[in-house]
Image (spheres, coloured by chain):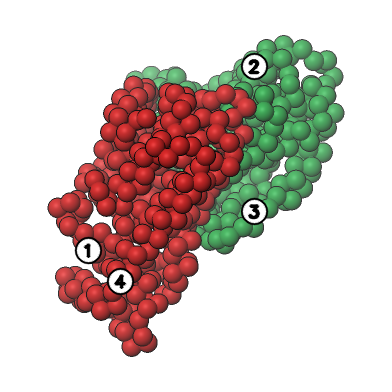
Chain colours: A red, B green
């Protein structure tokens, strides 16, 4: 069985081999730039691991892994246009380095290319592959739209937040695993357990991301903490605090959150104090653990020997950075 | 065989039946708005006509026709974002009515939905269908990027222009026809002749569009003439004039084109005088006729009785509005 590190190397080399050097330069240069940014490649590696779990040569799933990574990059580029984010992975974003129009077209092209890769499979597997891929793409858009709506909403419940995160983030992890299983010809039941494993570890991943924004080590996390607080984002921490607080504290939170005159560091500090009073850190860690446990239970149900699942379990833990 | 009017009615009713009333409203309301705009539905009707040509029930191609129309609408919505166009088909654009972000996400969703429709076919037809659909989507993006590049370029040759128009506009007509033929199980040779027919009538359509901007009847054309001149667009008329003019006239054209202080009506008038001196109207009409003739020759090569092609020929003529 392949480890995360093995697959990271294999996948990176395969991605490099792909010919994204076509004309016009204005379109393919941003594409190459975007996909060469060194993310953790979690999603395509999940695809390859899912395939490997059924003892099928991972080369059979390599194009689908690339499709997943291209789809992911498509949504990152577009999100940066919509959020007008200048920085991603510590580097200047496509939108900022080139222009919004070039970013939109480069993203479209990545999306169309993703479909070219996903269909590089045996014909009889196409309906299941495309069904999973299409539905995920549509749901990701829905999640992104919900997220945009949250910016204008004053009350976002925890359920709203969880649904949005599932659609926008977790389902792509789920689809990555299921697609690997489909290519491997896994029984549908097992493919669905892997999908559910993915939904849960995807949720854990998102909650951990929210947690790190407030309680992360800036050196390790790679970006400044408190950004979500300053952007008044409805994170898991914020929506949980709103639900756990009494009326008075809830009122203070809302006031702080919409205050635009407050010094940024004071704002972060004040909200953090409330989070601490309400034990939001522990509350979030508990939720992450619950998602991880639910995910691992689904993985257990996959009809494969326990020892073959060890790398998936390690990767799930890596995703929430219990171990590295 | 079905006429254009028959198919317009059938297609419009099928499109209305589709369920685009999902949540969130912010995403599906603009989608419904965009696809309910009354265009001529030329592309999906070409798909249905191509299917009908092989005496296969057009219901077999209805989902592919919808896919084509959704892909077309995806690109219209995005083009309007990029060009910041407030009006399309005489109505306010999605980008202007809602917001650029909503337009981008609605377009993405249309794109993903298009893939859901294109795959509603027999499994063995999926590789050919997806290959045609994917390549067209990628090439449309390339054409749009070239068009954006033209805005900044001082010299655009006629060849540059023709390549851009082929990619951005003509290939979708070609793909519409080929997809109908694939669904109908037509021989590959015939599907390719239909594709080439589509490329040529697509080019004729684009050149006619350029021509109408300068020489169209505003009442019939439905928009003001001279818009392309005011936006300094490198149309077929402009690039032809640049090639046909002597050095002195070419210099005048370039000066006029980049002049931002000139009164708009004076600018249109001055450039039109040069076009008239160079016989650009006749030159363009000749080019349109040539494309139509080349297209009809390809249609002739399709191994079907001449009488079964009459509605395709009428539609090709309608596209360049020789007859209505």
Q: Tell me how far mark 3 sits from mark 2, CA to CA.
A: 33 Å
Q: Position of residue A37 (x, y in %)?
A: 27, 37
Q: Using the image, name the chain to which the residue with label 1 belongs.
A: A
Instruction: Tell me which residue sits at (34%, 21%) in the image.
Output: A17
The span from disc 2 to disc 4 (Cα, nearest Å) is: 63 Å
Residue A312 sits above or below residue B249 on the image:
below
Q: Nearer the viewer, mark 2 or mark 4?
A: 4
Q: Which quadrant of the figure has residue A176? A: top left
The percent position of residue B50, horizontal first and vertical second, equals: 73, 26
Viewer-proximal residue among B251 and B299: B299
Sooner in the amino-acid sequence: mark 3 or mark 2: 3
10 Å neighbourhood of mark 1: few (<14), some, or many (≥20)?
A: some
What residue is shown with label 3?
B20
Tags 1 and 4 on a common chain:
yes
For the point 31% across and 63% down, which residue is it? A285
Which of the labelled discs sits on residue B192, or is there none?
Answer: 2
For the residues labelled 3 and 1, say whether their Cβ atoms are less than 8 Å apart. Answer: no
Kindly state the secondary structure of the residue where label 1 is placed: helix
- Do residues under tags 3 and 2 come within 8 Å of each other at their CB atoms? no
Helix, strand or loop at label 3? It is: loop
Res A158 label: none
* Measured Cα–Cα span from mark 3 to mark 1: 42 Å
Could you confirm whether marks 2 and 4 are on the same chain?
A: no
Residue drawn at (21%, 53%), measured in percent from left and top?
Answer: A221
Q: Chain of mark 3?
A: B
In front: label 3 or label 2: 3
Residue matched to label 1: A215
Q: For this rendering, which residue is in front, A174 or B265?
A: A174
Which residue is identified by label 4? A280
Question: How many numbered tags mark residues here?
Answer: 4
């Amino acid at each position: 069985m392949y480890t995360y590190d093995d697959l990271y190397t294999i996948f990176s080399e395969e991605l490099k081999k792909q010919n994204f050097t076509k004309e016009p330069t204005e379109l393919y240069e941003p594409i190459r730039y975007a996909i060469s940014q060194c993310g953790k490649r979690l999603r395509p590696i999940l695809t390859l691991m899912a395939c490997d779990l059924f003892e099928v040569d991972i080369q059979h799933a390599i194009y689908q892994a690339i499709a997943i990574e291209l789809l992911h990059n498509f949504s990152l580029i577009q999100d940066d246009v919509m959020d007008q984010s200048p920085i991603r992975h510590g580097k200047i974003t496509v939108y900022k380095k080139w222009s919004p129009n070039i970013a939109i077209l480069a993203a479209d092209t990545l999306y169309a290319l993703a479909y070219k890769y996903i269909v590089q499979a045996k014909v009889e597997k196409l309906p299941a592959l495309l069904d999973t891929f299409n539905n995920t793409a549509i749901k990701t858009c829905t999640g992104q739209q919900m997220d945009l709506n949250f910016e204008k909403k004053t009350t976002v419940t925890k359920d709203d937040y969880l649904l949005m995160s599932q659609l926008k983030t977790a389902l792509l992890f789920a689809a990555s695993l299921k697609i690997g299983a489909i290519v491997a010809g896994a029984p549908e039941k097992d493919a669905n357990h892997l999908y559910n494993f993915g939904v849960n570890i995807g949720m854990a991943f998102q909650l951990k991301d929210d947690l790190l924004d407030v309680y992360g080590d800036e050196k390790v996390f790679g970006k400044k903490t408190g950004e979500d607080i300053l952007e008044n984002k409805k994170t898991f921490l914020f929506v949980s605090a709103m639900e756990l607080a009494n009326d008075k504290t809830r009122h203070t939170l809302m006031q702080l959150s919409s205050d635009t005159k407050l010094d940024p560091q004071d704002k972060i500090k004040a909200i953090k104090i409330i989070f601490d009073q309400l034990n939001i850190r522990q509350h979030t860690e508990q939720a992450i653990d619950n998602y991880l446990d639910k995910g691992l239970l689904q993985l257990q149900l996959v009809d494969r020997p326990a020892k073959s699942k060890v790398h998936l379990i390690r990767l799930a833990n890596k995703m929430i950075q219990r171990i590295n």
